[in-house]
Amino acid sequence: MERLQKKIANLGYCSRRKAEELIINGEVLVNGEVVTKLGTTVNPGDIITVEGNILDNTKSYEYYLLNKPKGVVTTTNDEKGRKTVVDIIDTKTRIYPVGRLDYDTTGALILTNDGKLANLLMRPDSLVDKTYIVKVKGLVTIPDLQKLRKGVVIGDITTKRAKVKLKSFDKKKNTSIVEITIHEGKNHQIKKMFSSLGYEVIKLRREKYGNLDLKSLLVGEYRPLSIKEVKILYSLCKK
């Protein structure tokens, strides 16, 4: 059995706090009866209706957006005993990260137990945009920005076209901050792209993943995705 407000949040309808408000306001039904008590628990087979919407209470998919901190590994377990992204999420469900962010990289990371969505997002031909803020050593030139836009050679591949914008630069510290949007996800891709042009990445943060951004999340915080957000992610995978 599981508390009703937590179940609604885990099913991706809204946050747990919002679910509590909906329960108190009489907007939630369990098996056709209005429930206003926050301590109410539900079973997997119960029919939950929120604001007239019947939730799928059989699959129990969970979706989270995490603002990954630095020094946390993107895996379900670590042989060196380091903290993992899964350790941060308060759930008993076996979830896993979608893709990877390096140990020293921060930002937007999706975790879920929905294998279908995870596979769609991680496909080599996925066209879902991922936006990064990159701080590098050196003053990035306009010709190099254009090279990043058109694609650069890293190893035996040429990266696909990217959206690139110079956000700022500091001549005294000899650093630049660049915003770059790609839809590929090769290992260490952003670092390798800048390295190919002679720039060392000092700091890297994924600011946005598809339709999801970090506006409401501090580093180390996370939130469940809404049903609408999940549907949009699915639609982006099909484009």
Image: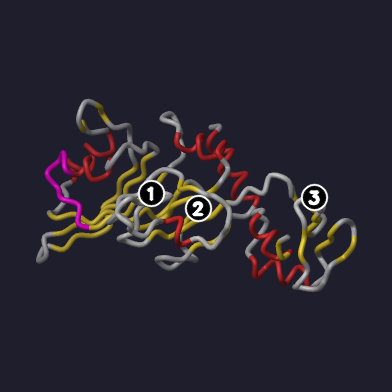
Of tags 3 and 1, the one toward the viewer is 3
Element type at mark 1:
strand
Question: What stretch of residues is rendered in magenta?
Answer: 195-202
- Residue type pointed to by label 3: Gly
Of tags 3 and 2, the one toward the viewer is 3
- Residue type pointed to by label 2: Leu
**Quadrant of the image for the N terminus?**
bottom right
Against 172, residue 233 (above or below) is above
Residue under numbered circle 3 = 45
Q: Position of residue 103 (x, y in %)?
A: 29, 54
Q: CA distance from mark 3 to mark 2?
A: 31 Å
Residue under numbered circle 2 = 212
What residue do we see at 28% from left, 40% from top? 189
- Residue type pointed to by label 1: Thr
Residue under numbered circle 1 = 131
Q: Is residue 198 magenta?
A: yes
Q: Quadrant of residue 168?
A: bottom left
Q: Is residue 22 left or right of residue 64?
A: right
What residue do we see at 79% from left, 59% from top? 51
Element type at mark 2:
strand
